[in-house]
Amino acid sequence: MIIPTLHRILVKADKLEEVDKTHQQAKKLGIVIPEHEDKKRAQAGVDTGTVVSLGPTAFRDFNADSPIKEGDYIAYARFAGKIITDPKTEEEYVILNDEDVVCIFKE
């Protein structure tokens, strides 16, 4: 389990294959794009994801209640945060500063 500290937010970033039209097309055609440095750099540029948890002081500096909650789908500053891997599940997440959240997508 990963618990964000202070003003940080834990986000499950969208997969490149889900948001990039070229990767979506390749997947439909049955083409597998191998892991390589270019793909890793492109994944780092993904700027949307789902909030997993919030640190205890997230958004407190803005003198307001947190505008986001767990489960919200957000956009954040491109290349913001740090990619970390859960040691138990091997899943990758992004840890962001609260100020890197750009918007919340609502239905």
Image (spheres, rainbow, N blue to C red):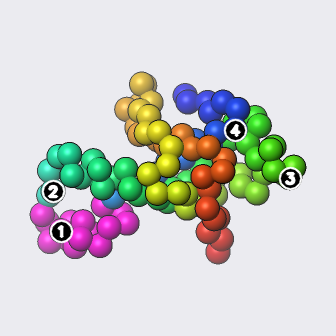
Label 1 Cα neighbours within 10 Å, binned few <14 / some 14-19 / many ≥20: few
Name the quadrant of the N terminus.
Answer: top right
Is residue 20 one of those drawn in magenta? yes
Residue carrying label 2:
33
Q: Tell me the mark number nearer the camera, choosing from 4 and 2.
A: 4
Q: Tell me the mark number nearer the camera, choosing from 3 and 2.
A: 3
Could you tell me which residue is drawn at 44 percent across and 34 percent down?
84
Q: Is the magenta stretch mostly helix, strand or loop?
A: helix
Assess whether mark 2 and mark 1 are in contact (beta carbons under 8 angstroms).
yes
**Mark drawn on residue 26:** 1
Q: Can residue 15 be seen in this view?
A: no
Could you tell me which residue is drawn at 36 percent across and 63 percent down?
18
Q: Is residue 18 visible?
A: yes
What's the CA distance linking mark 3 and mark 2? 44 Å
For residue 66, side relative to residue 29 (left or right): right
Amino acid type assigned to the residue bearing label 2 in the image:
Ile
Q: Which residue lies furthest to the top in this view?
A: 87
Magenta-colored span = 17-31
**Mark drawn on residue 7:** 4
